[in-house]
Image (spheres, rainbow, N blue to C red):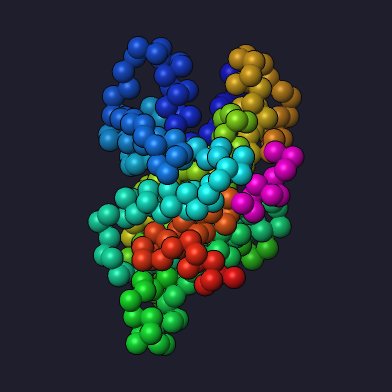
Amino acid sequence: MAQIRTDLALEAKALWQERAGEMTRLEGVEATESVREGFPCTLVHITSDRGAQALGMPVGRYVTLTMDGLLRREENAFSRGVTAIARELESLMDDLPEDGPVLVVGLGNSAITPDAIGPRAHRYTLVTRHLVEGLPEQFGAFRPVSALAPGVLGTTGMESGQVVQAVCRELRPVCVVAVDALAARSVSRLCRTVQLADTGIAPGSGIGNCRAALNRETLGIPVLAVGVPTVVDCATLAADLAPGAALSHSGDLLVTPKDIDSRVDDLSKVIGYGISMALQPGLTVGDLDLLLT
């Protein structure tokens, strides 16, 4: 049987339910649905090791925003999307100091579009650490925020996790917010879903190229993850569309939307703005337009 890969807790829960039966209760996992700024929002809370083992994901909170309205260019979809991401991220940061320094990390390879969500979101992140330290009279009300796009092993010779660990030792942030591309089970989720989690992230895990994890255990501080599924593994797609089917050498193939360039640009901007608004709650989308352009 082909291994079905997904980084989305929502899909992992649905897959477990399909295999176990709709009426079977999944212990250690709670799911609630709501609407945030007009976008469907699902919280999957893994509360125990048993639930974590069942879904293959760490204990923690996973928030999924389905942002079809952004793809359809609905009225005010961008500003609503920014606000939705900001509010959900704020809820995951509820136990952090309000003025503590934060490091935002854009993971991935900027030269490969489906893997460029992190580096491009990095461009739309408002960095303030240098301003707060250099001009405290004017910018003292801002949270100190630093941003980093560490690249990938093949172009830097360093694991991104090593780079982030070194920067954290120097800057001593109270939290890291990591942005990365994810893998989904379903094509319908590609570039339509944003997942936020308080469990950290393992870059490349969805496509079987797992690197050193960024989480509380490796960095010693909370790590919040923001991700967008941009690819589906072909073996996963075949198994999902036709159970029992298999593709020879399909593990080397990935599917991504034909308009991936524009979708990555749109989602990178809404994520970068959303993170910036969450870290600087007093700012509006209009303020960020002025400060980031």
Residue at left offset 70%, top offset 52%: 112
The front one of 285 and 136 is 285
Does any portion of residue 92 appear in the rendered image? yes
Total number of numbered discs in the rendering? 0
Verify whether residue 260 appears in magenta: yes
Above or below for 163 versus 46 = below
Residue at left offset 61%, top offset 59%: 120
The majority secondary structure of the magenta stretch comes to: helix
Q: Which residues are magenta?
A: 257-266
Could you tell me which quadrant the C terminus lies in? bottom right
Could you tell me which quadrant the N terminus lies in? top right
Q: Position of residue 47 (x, y in %)?
A: 28, 35
Q: Position of residue 59 (x, y in %)?
A: 33, 39
The front one of 141 and 284 is 284
Q: Quadrant of residue 21?
A: top left
Residue at left offset 69%, top offset 35%: 255
Q: Position of residue 221 (x, y in %)?
A: 33, 60
Residue at left offset 53%, top offset 49%: 76
Q: Position of residue 190 (x, y in %)?
A: 60, 37
Verify whether residue 235 appears in magenta: no
The front one of 57 and 75 is 75
